[in-house]
Amino acid sequence: MNEIARFLKKSWVLYILLLTPVFYLFIPQSRSDTEYLADPAKYLLEYVGLSATILFVIVLMITPLRKIFPKSPIIKAFAFNRRQIGVSVFIYALLHLLIYFAYTGSWSGFVKDWEKLFILSGIVALVLLLVLATTSNNRSVRILGGKRWKRIHRLAYAIMFLLIYHQATQEKTGYRETAKIFAPLLLLQACRIGLHAKYTFDQRSKE
Ligand code: HEM
């Protein structure tokens, strides 16, 4: 177990794992997918958006997993790399936006789409992801102070709801597919809250 954790902590392993969605696109099978053949730009738009969302769910799962399994070296290895995983969410989301520009073909198309609530939810989520990515370094923690930094990083939960809305309102994915992606995270958060409530209850009964 410790060997796997040590392996996962290596930065080259992390970068290979984070680039897996890109590597997948170079596999010939991915390009023989009927959805890719029908509309490659749309396929890439959805594929990259989904990659960003899955990575986002993984990042948010780390804290509750740490609370539930405090001794697990594998979870500790993921926690060690959390910052880089978080920044990669922003990079994939930005790529999703660039593909969207290529897909709609113009800036005016983007401005027109702005009125659609699901596009607006994506834009707000991306702006908030930018805030988190730019303040994810040690310098920002020092400048902002631990408490304020933590408060800012709670924006991740607002992003979660925006992304649930952004994805669930897609005709193709809908609420059912979105629920499958976010259910493990919501379940872990519920366990975390349960553990915290139990801890508080135990402390109070000791007093
Ligand atoms: C400027 C911001 C954004 C714009 C303009 C935008 C645009 C779009 C569009 C047009 C679609 C629908 C594609 C289709 O026709 O099927 C889509 C789907 C999606 N987007 Fe975004 N998006 C934005 C931000 C984000 C962010 C920040 C994330 C995640 C971190 C994200 C994740 C997704 C996902 C998961 C889907 C559904 C993919 C699927 O159908 O499988 N988007 N987005």
Image (tube, rainbow, N blue to C red):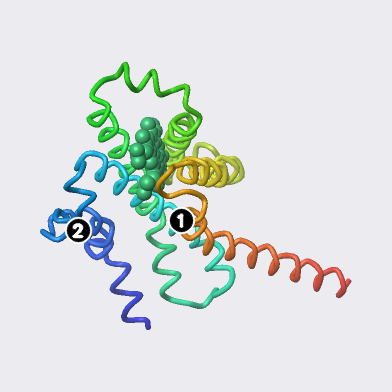
Q: Within the displayed image, which quadrant is ligand 1 positioned in?
A: top left
Question: Up-down: is 44 above or below 206?
Answer: above
Q: Which residue is mark 1?
A: 177
Sequence order check, earlier mark of 2 and 1 = 2
Residue drawn 54% across the image and 75% down it: 69
Question: What residue occupies the far top of the structure in this picture?
Answer: 108
Q: Where on the picture, by quarter, is residue 24?
A: bottom left
Question: Foreground residue, 202 or 43?
Answer: 43
Which quadrant is the N terminus positioned in?
bottom left
Q: Position of residue 47 (x, y in %)?
A: 29, 49
Does mark 1's beta carbon lie closer than 8 Å to ligand 1?
Answer: yes
Residue 184 lies left or right of residue 3; in this view the side is right
Q: Where on the picture, by quarter, is residue 76?
A: bottom left
Question: Up-down: is 145 above or below 181?
Answer: above
Mark 2: amino acid: Tyr
Residue drawn 42% across the image and 35% down it: 126
Q: Position of residue 182 (x, y in %)?
A: 51, 57
Question: Foreground residue, 150 or 68?
Answer: 68
Which quadrant is the C terminus positioned in?
bottom right
Question: Foreground residue, 206 or 35?
Answer: 35
Cβ–Cβ under 8 Å for marks 2 and 1:
no
Q: Where on the picture, by quarter, is residue 8?
A: bottom left
Residue drawn 37% across the image and 81% down it: 2
Mark 2 vs mark 1, foreground winner is: 1
Within-10-Å neighbours for mark 2: few <14, some 14–19, many 20+: few
Q: Position of residue 31 (x, y in %)?
A: 14, 53
Question: Foreground residue, 30 or 191?
Answer: 30
Mark 1: amino acid: Glu
Q: Which residue is mark 2?
A: 24
Question: Up-down: is 37 above or below 110?
Answer: below
